Image (cartoon, rainbow, N blue to C red):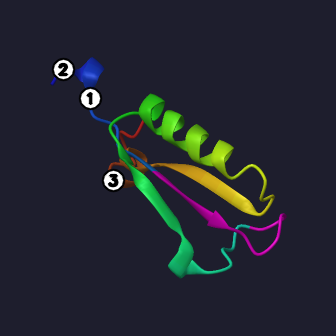
Amino acid sequence: MSENNKQLLHLVFGGELENLDGMEFRNLDDVDLVGVYPDYKSAEVAWRAKAQSTVDNAHMRYFIVHMHRLLDPEHGS
């Protein structure tokens, strides 16, 4: 795999938050682990689909985590 096509893992997950100002989930057992994706673009497509499907619940939030930055913080561009 070339440097330009380097796998940059991203995690998409979400759930219902306790309140709109915080980042604490109401129930960790209900956190939705959507998946791990090889690049940001793929993760964004999944994130957008999940966020759109829960638009009627203001407490639902989905996130993209740049796992590659956590796994290799010195080179996680």
Magenta residues (range): 12-22
Q: Nearer the viewer, residue 69 or 27?
A: 27
SS for tag 3?
Answer: helix
Task: Give the CA separation, mark 3 to mark 2.
Answer: 19 Å
Amino acid type of disc 3?
Leu
Residue 4 spot, x, y in % from top left: 29, 18
Give the residue at mark 1.
Answer: 6
Q: Residue 71's mark?
A: 3
Residue 28 spot, x, y in % from top left: 55, 79
In which quadrant is the C terminus drawn?
top left
Mark 1 burial class by Cα count in 10 Å: few <14, some 14-19, many 20+ = few
Give the residue at mark 2.
Answer: 2
Residue at the image point whose x is 54% and y is 70% from the top: 31
Left or right: 16 in relation to 34: right
Residue at the image point whose x is 15% and y is 25% from the top: 1
Task: Give the CA separation, mark 3 to mark 1.
Answer: 14 Å
The disc, 3 or 2, on the residue closer to the chain's N-terminal end is 2
Residue 70 spot, x, y in % from top left: 40, 54
The disc, 3 or 1, on the residue closer to the chain's N-terminal end is 1
Instruction: Please say if the residues under marks 1 and 2 sit with CB atoms less than 8 Å apart.
Output: yes
Residue at the image point whose x is 43% and y is 33% from the top: 42
